[in-house]
Structure formats: structure tokens, C-alpha cells
Image (tube, rainbow, N blue to C red):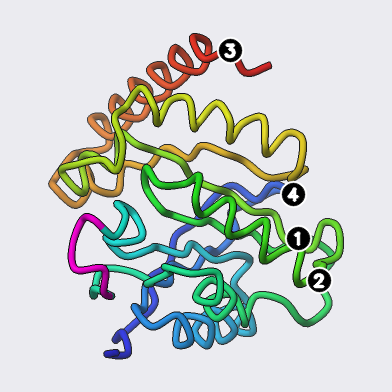
Amino acid sequence: WPRPERVSAARYPRPWGAGPALCSVVEAADPTLAGELIGEELRAGADGVWLRFDRTTRLGPESGDGGPSSDGVAVHHGTDLAAALAGLTGGERSAPRQLWLDAGANALPLAALWLAYNERRALPDGAVAVHLAADPLAALARDGELPRDLTKLSSEMAALVRFCAGRLPGSSAIGVTTVTHHEAGADPVQELAFTVATLLEYVRRLADSGPS
């Protein structure tokens, strides 16, 4: 497991006050190493963590040999997620830690793993605000394929919206990202266009699926 040379950073709107918050992007393949990096970043002042998962986690074991790859955290079992999140809690905070679980189009299985982890750890209410970041269109742009067809994934997104509303207050189910477009050379206007078009498509699909 090679240790990454750096942990990248992103900024997002601070949900509990004015100004941006700092989010550390962690994608070390080894879950234990990812957990160590998360702890280091939070102790250094990060407000939250964006956990990027590897291709097998994003697409399922049938996408490859089922082993870890170097493009994200390898979370194939509940114990892997527990190891990756070992550094998430601890210390006194007046606001919840923000956690993005970037599994691309495969957010539903990660939501189940998070719920099991949360129940085992019995985290205090409001300690962590989890964002499941379901974004199948961005996942298709990044990976060139999806773990299931888009109709099934749209139904899963609707289920995630209901799940977050009922079981995870302060969380979110969908997260639209243009990182892949940016890295491919899109300018800010093009990124905005992709974002708006993706949001509109998700709204249409969610309306068709009927979440309240």
C-alpha cells in the first residue's frame, strides 16, 4: 500500500455559518492508512473529509479481480469502512464533522455499511453529518460504466433520499460533482452547465420515482 504523497483539499459552503470550510480528500487504498490520514487531517483543522473509494467499491467486485486498486480507498466489507473511519471521531467540536462517501453510482451499499457502522459505534446525535454523494452521471463520466442500469440507480437515489430524510437528519443523499469534467479541461462555464444539466436530470428522475 503506497502512502500518498499528499492529501488534496476542497472547499465547500459551511452549513453552520458564514465562509467556506476545509474538506480533506482522502483516497489512500489501505483503509487503515486512510483512517490514520483522516485523523491527521482533522487534528490539523479540517472541518470534514471526502472519502474517495476505489473502482471495485464503486462498481462492484465483478468490475475487476475484486482486489484493491490505487485509485481510492478499498472498502469491500464493513470492517474496511470501520478501519477507514477510525480517525473520524474524537475531540470537542461545536459543529458536526462533515463526511462525504464518494462511491459514485454505488452509494446504496455504502449507505448500508455506514448505517451498520453508526449503529455499532453508537455515535452521538449530530456528531457526524454524512453525505452519500450519489452521482451516477458523474460516475459514468469517470469510470465509463455503471454498476447497474440508470433506471435502477434512479430508484436507488430516490430510496436514498427517503432514507436520509428518515434515518440520517442533517445528511444528504445526492452530490453533483464536476471533478472529472474539470480534470478533462472543462472551463468554469462548462462545469456550471454540466452541474445544472445534471441537477435537472436528477430532479426529473426523482420526480418520476416519487420520493416525498
Q: Comparing marks 1 and 3, which lies closer to the viewer? A: 3
Measured in 3D between alpha carbons, the distance from the residue under mark 2 to the one under mark 1, in whole angstroms, is 7 Å
Locate the C terminus and report the quarter of the image it occupies: top right
Tell me, for residue 96, which label it has, or none: 1
Q: Compared with residue 141, is residue 84 higher up or lower down, i.e. above or below? A: below
* Residue that numbered label 4 is attached to: 17
* Residue that numbered label 2 is attached to: 93
Secondary structure, mark 3, is loop
Q: Residue at x 26, y 40 (%)?
A: 146
Q: Residue at x 55, y 81 (%)?
A: 83
Secondary structure, mark 2, is loop
Instruction: Return the x and y of residue 169 as percentages of the image width and height.
Output: 77, 43
What residue type is disc 1 on? Pro
Q: Comparing marks 3 and 4, which lies closer to the viewer? A: 3
Residue 29: quarter of image: bottom left
Instruction: Return the x and y of residue 76 as percentages of the image width and height.
Output: 42, 68
The magenta stretch is 62-67
Residue 211: quarter of image: top right
